[in-house]
Each structure stands twice: as C-alpha cells, then as structure tokens.
Amino acid sequence: MSLTCKILASFLLIFAVSTKGEVSENTKVIWGRLDHDINLDIPGFQMNDGIADTRWDKNKIKIAQLKQDKPPYQITDTYVMLKNGTLKIKALKRNDSDVYTVSVYDSNGKNILEKAFDLKIQEVVSKPVISWSCTNRTLICEVAKGSDPKLKLFLNETRIKESHQKVITHKWNSKWTASFNCMASNNVSAQKSTVTISCSEKGLDIYLIIGICGGGTVFLVFVALLVFYISKRKKQRRKRNDEELEIRGKRVTPEERGLKPHQIPGSTPQNPAMSQTPPIPGHRSQAPAHRPRPPGPRVQHQQKKRPPPTLGKQVHQQKGPPLPKPRVQTKPPCEAEENS
C-alpha cells in the first residue's frame, strides 16, 4: 500500500512540474527588452459589444481583467488592461519572463478565444568596440553589454568570422588597407561598428621612431635632473665645510685666554750667577759688569705693542706665546787678552 502511494505521489509531482508554465504548440514567443515596456496584443481579435469578459493570467494566476459595466482590474501597477484587450507590462524585469494566457468570453459565458504568449526578456546589446594592433596583426571586436550576444565580423562586406561570445578575435598575415565591420545582435537589438585599418611598413616605422624619440627624451631629462641634484649637494657640502672652518678660526681656547703677558709657558726663572761665564784660570776675576734689570711685566707689555706696519713693508706677526730672550754673556776684560 505504501509503495502504491509513493508511486502515485511521484506521478502527480512530475505532472505538476511538467504542466507548470507549459507552452503548447499554439503558444507565441514574444521577446521583450529589459527595463522597457511591452504590449501583448491579441492577434486577430477585435473588441465588440458581444464580449463580456477578457482575462489575462500569468502562469494560471489572474493578473488583469476587463468586464462589462465594471472598472478594469490589475493585480499591481505593473500591468495595465487596455480597452481593446491588450495587456501592457511596464519596465520589464527578468522575473517577468513567463507564459501569459488571455481568455475571452461572450455574454453567454462561452469561451470564444484563448491565446498563450511565452514572454522572454533580454538586455539590449551595446555598440561593439573594435581594436587592432599592426605589430602582431590582430583585430579584436568586443561587446560590453547585452544578453546572449552574437558577433559577426565582415571584411569588405564579406563575413569572415562569427561567434556567440562577447569577444571575437581575428589575425591576418598580409599587408593591406581594409574596412572591417563588426555587428553585435540578439533577439531584441542590434549594433554595428566600422573601422578602416592601414598597416603599411612606413606607418610602422613612424610609430617606432616616435616611441624611440619619446623614450630618449625621458632618459635625457632624467640624466639632467640627476646631474643637477648631485651638483647642488656638492655645493651645499662645500658651503657647510667653509662655515665650519670659519667658526673654528674664530674660537679661542680657555688656556690662551688665561695666560698673562709676563708668563711664558715652559720657561724657568734664570739665575744671574749661573748665566756668567767661569773666570779664566790664572787671572783675577773682575766684578761682573752691571746688567740692566729685565723689563717687568709693564715694560714687556709695552714692548709687545708695536707700531702698525708701514705700506710696502710686510711685518711678520708672531703667533702664540713670546719666545724667551737669549742670555747675555759678559766679555773677558782686555787685560786678560793681553796677558794671554
């Protein structure tokens, strides 16, 4: 019993699926443009006073109806029922694609006409774009928008290639000037583009020369900027070194500032007795000649102040601490010389 129920349920399910949106032999296929309006006209039908009821169904669901002495009915604002029985659908969407059925009844309730329309919706194709390259001798035709586009390529009005894709490619081996036509189409629209291609050797040389000249110009500009940058850096470094040397020359060490004029670094006080020469043996010694006292700090300071050098004479200025004076040696008396 359970097996029989399963078989019956399966049969009913298959029947329901097969009959949903069923398209009979007398169903007319209608193509509509996406986002455009469409009118479903009833072929061979003319509205008259004997028609009492006109009804439109979408997949066996009533969507619009027009009865005598009653206002028209539509399930949504998308559908509009016209007086001649035509169904207008606004701004088609992809989900509007379905089977629509119209039924016409007379005043006695008799069905005098019934028609089915299989509405299919497609997006209109855009204008194809043709591009080519003379280097590898390749032509490409491409369409950006459109449902199920069909591309056809013509060379001088002769079809040379066809494709159901959005891109079509063609290569040639000869050198010529020719006119290409590329057409994109589907069931709701068609667009066409035409180009004339000239790929001579002279043209190729011109493009090559232009490319080389452009690249060389860019390279020269780069080299000039690099040289300018390096020279500018060198000038800045030289200027910085000169400033540092000038600052070092103006600096005075704390030791040089603390030295007094009468103090001579590295010198020791001299003993007058030690500076005298020893007497010659066999002679009587004489009293040493009177030596003037060494100038004091005041006299030394005055001696340091020298008059400014006159024009034409170059005076050597001593740098650093003053040098010690040479020791004064007394000459032996004249009597000692005569006795010798």
Image (cartoon, rainbow, N blue to C red):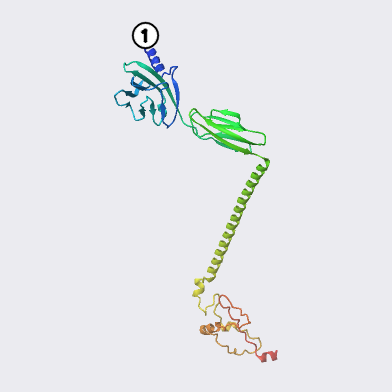
Residue 55 location (% of width, % of height): 35, 22
Q: Is residue 138 left or right of residue 96?
A: right
Q: Residue at x 39, y 21 (%)?
A: 101
Query: In the picture, which quadrant includes the C terminus?
Result: bottom right
Q: Which residue is mark 1?
A: 4
| Above/below status of 9 relative to 253 | above
Mark 1: which secondary structure? helix
Residue 160 location (% of width, % of height): 61, 29
Q: Quadrant of residue 167?
A: top right
| Above/below status of 293 relative to 99 | below
| Above/below status of 111 relative to 235 | above
Q: Is residue 56 left or right of residue 307?
A: left
Q: Residue at x 62, y 51 (%)?
A: 217
Q: Quadrant of residue 121?
A: top left
| Residue count near mark 1 (Cα–Cα under 10 Å), binned few <14, some 14–19, many ≥20 | few
Q: Nearer the viewer, residue 21 or 266?
A: 21
Residue 268 location (% of width, % of height): 55, 77
Q: Residue furthest left?
A: 69
